[in-house]
Image (cartoon, helix red, strand yellow):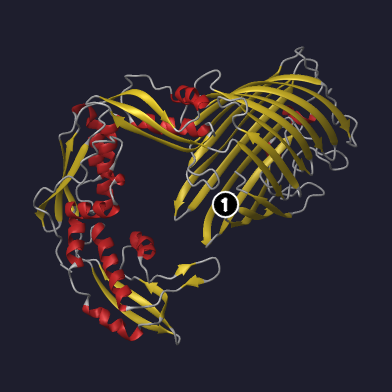
């Protein structure tokens, strides 16, 4: 292994020349082996690593011969830079692997030890340590095991010199400045960072309409520990889209595909159009395969090619579940996604739970109002069977979902319902509102930038919801309500996440209404709410300690989540909140707070959770100080 940084003094050939057939291609479309060889010829560190491939195995590996055939019970790498330890361990064949039950141990052989040593040298070289040396040794661990040690001496560090970008369009100067700032002079050389910089240059050119850009890299020696990097760019011509060509879709869905994509001839070329079109087509839930790419037509235009495969239109579903808030949950339904043709579907289903039963018939029409909207008509019969009341309700709802934005959606609609209330409360004035015909208008604005729908690790979710049932408009109990709630997910490294939640809601009667109907009130407590209280037990109760809800609710939570071992994880949380019967009763001193620890078990449908919450404030009469909650999925 050479002990001085290797540098190329000549300009290397371009590592990506583009495709004559597909202007969408990036270096990721090249074979992995070719990418690695090209990049190795273009970077300081990878050149040193390539030289090490021709070298014989380090002589100190011979000391491991006596341990051949033993299982490697532990692998340590003293001296390895801390930020590379996890990456190095994951890439070595001899490193013990965790499994659901126990560990998988590799058998030590000279061939495996030699390969792992070279892998580690290559990794160090790619991250700015081309002169690193590795000394291997073993320590007996019982009669059949060995503790393997790869001691690392990093040696001299290669650093960036001048970063030059040639052939770059003047109108994109800001993008070039961003790339230079990401590779500051004097910083330690890092091959992945150089590769990301090249990718960013390619993406900037493509998003500016240059469908066939080329960016090559050359490294020039300045001194033994410094290398200047030049990105040589060829933007080529700017392109525009000509037309959308659809293949694989049934005839009745072709017009819907064209309306959903809404590609006008002459639209400037951009990969973002492909990404957005793919997302909008997947939201139709009509295709199991959505492949989009740009096909050159001539020197200035490209066609957008859509290769689609329809999914099974008729599907059935059935599920059985349980959690603390509802010990038995049964659901079933049948869906035909193209029942009325042209993407207009039909759903019929029902569900049964401890406190709620419903039957639903729903139909929808995509693209009726705008190209990227979904109009929905729902007929629902619902029974809310609570300890303090029973409400039977028939509801007809017409709504429209707009999803033209990348992270944001908007739903607007009108609901007409007819209800019948059976008051079971011990207090005669607990439910004073008349329950009968009600008409309301509602709107929901939703924004989601989280990276994972089941286990988010970064991003945020924000929802604003408003409902208005105007007096005298087919309404026996008019009201208004507003709710704003959101979650923020902050990565803490190594799959650790800090999740924050804030939820505020208020509702009030209008006109001559004496009170809110029970289904328009706010409740709190339970698995996904304030975990220090049982379901709906936080807030106003009647004389039998049954919940009756209120006009105002506030919830706040903070939770740290981290992996423990294999599929198991843990969470440390603090929940706070309260529900007030009237708006005039709101007092911050009434807030209840609980803290606890959760056990998480990862599953394909989200984590199974077991939370133990302890109330830090004195709980209400009849409420336990410590409570066990069980559920599926994160509470927020």
Q: Residue at x 63, y 22 (%)?
A: 399
Q: What percent of the width, then of the height, locates residue 236? A: 19, 31
- Answer left or right for 576 relative to 262: right
Residue 142 seen in render: yes
Image vertical order of residue 184 relative to residue 5, above or below: above
> Residue, x 75% and y 18% (percent of image)?
510
How many C-alpha atoms fall within 10 Å of the one at disc 1: few (<14), some, or many (≥20)? few
Q: Position of residue 493 (x, y in %)?
A: 44, 53
Q: Specify whether residue 582 is in view.
A: no
The residue wearing badge 1 is 604
The quadrant in which the C terminus is found is top right
Name the residue rendered at 63%, 39% in the picture: 315
Q: On screen, 376 above or below 45?
A: above
Rendered residue at 21%/27% (across/down): 237
* Closer to the camera in the image, 159 or 429: 159
Q: Which percent across, then down, holds residue 436?
A: 83, 21
Looking at the image, which is closer to me, 365 or 36? 365
In screen coordinates, is 305 left or right of 321? left
Q: Secondary structure at mark 1?
A: loop
Q: Quadrant of residue 544?
A: top right
């Amino acid at each position: 292994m050479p002990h001085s940084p290797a540098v190329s003094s000549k300009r290397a050939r371009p590592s990506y020349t583009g495709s004559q057939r597909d202007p969408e291609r990036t270096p990721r479309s090249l074979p992995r082996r070719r990418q690695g060889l090209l990049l190795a010829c273009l970077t300081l560190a990878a050149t040193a690593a390539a030289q090490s491939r021709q070298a014989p195995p380090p002589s100190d590996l011979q000391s491991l011969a006596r341990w051949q055939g033993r299982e490697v019970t532990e692998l340590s790498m003293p001296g390895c830079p801390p930020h590379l330890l996890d990456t190095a361990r994951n890439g070595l064949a001899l490193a013990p692997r965790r499994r659901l039950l126990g560990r998988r141990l590799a058998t030590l052989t000279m061939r495996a030890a030699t390969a792992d040593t070279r892998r580690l040298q290559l990794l160090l070289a790619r991250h700015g340590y081309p002169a690193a040396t590795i000394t291997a040794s073993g320590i007996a661990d019982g009669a059949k095991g060995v503790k393997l040690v790869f001691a690392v001496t990093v040696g001299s560090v290669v650093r960036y010199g001048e970063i030059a970008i040639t052939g770059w369009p003047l109108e994109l100067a800001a993008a070039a400045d961003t790339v230079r700032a990401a590779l500051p002079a004097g910083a330690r050389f890092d091959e992945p960072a150089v590769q990301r910089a090249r990718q960013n240059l390619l993406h900037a050119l493509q998003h500016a309409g240059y469908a066939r850009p080329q960016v090559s890299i050359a490294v020039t020696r300045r001194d033994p520990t410094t290398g200047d990097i030049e990105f040589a760019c060829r933007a080529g011509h700017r392109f525009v889209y000509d037309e959308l060509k659809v293949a694989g879709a049934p005839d009745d869905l072709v017009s819907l595909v064209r309306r959903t994509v809404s590609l006008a001839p002459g639209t400037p070329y951009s990969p973002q159009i492909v990404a957005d079109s793919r997302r909008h087509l997947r939201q139709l839930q009509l295709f199991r395969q959505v492949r989009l790419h740009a096909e050159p037509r001539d020197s200035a235009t490209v066609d957008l090619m859509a290769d689609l495969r329809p999914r099974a239109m008729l599907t059935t579903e059935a599920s059985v579940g349980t959690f603390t808030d509802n010990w038995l949950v049964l659901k079933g339904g049948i869906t035909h996604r193209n029942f009325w043709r042209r993407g207009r579907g039909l759903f019929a289903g029902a569900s049964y739970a401890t406190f709620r039963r419903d039957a639903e018939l729903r139909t929808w029409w995509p693209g009726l109002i705008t190209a990227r909207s979904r109009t929905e008509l729902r007929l629902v019969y619902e029974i809310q069977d609570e300890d303090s009341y029973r409400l039977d309700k028939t509801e007809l709802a017409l709504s429209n979902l707009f999803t033209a934005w990348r992270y944001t959606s908007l739903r607007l609609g009108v609901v007409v319902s007819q209800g019948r209330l059976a008051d079971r409360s011990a207090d005669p004035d607990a439910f004073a509102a008349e329950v009968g015909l009600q008409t309301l208008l509602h709107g929901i604005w939703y924004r989601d930038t989280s990276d994972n729908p089941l286990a988010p690790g970064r991003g945020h979710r924000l929802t604003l919801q408003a409902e208005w049932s105007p007096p005298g408009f087919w309404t026996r109990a008019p009201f208004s309500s507003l709710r704003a709630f959101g979650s923020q997910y902050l990565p803490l490294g190594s799959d650790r996440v800090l999740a924050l939640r804030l939820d505020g809601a208020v509702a009030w009667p209008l006109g001559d209404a004496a009170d809110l109907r029970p289904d328009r009130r706010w409740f709190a407590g339970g698995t996904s709410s304030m975990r220090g209280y049982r379901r709906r037990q936080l807030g106003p109760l009647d004389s039998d300690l049954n919940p009756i809800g209120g006009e105002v609710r506030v919830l706040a939570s903070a939770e740290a989540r981290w992996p423990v071992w294999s599929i198991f994880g843990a969470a440390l949380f603090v929940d706070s909140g309260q529900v007030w019967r009237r708006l005039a009763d709101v007092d911050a001193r009434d807030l209840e707070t609980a803290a606890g620890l959760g056990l998480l078990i990862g599953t394909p449908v989200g984590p199974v959770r077991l939370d133990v919450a302890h109330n830090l404030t004195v709980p209400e009469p009849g409420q336990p100080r410590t409570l066990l909650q069980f559920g599926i999925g994160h509470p927020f």
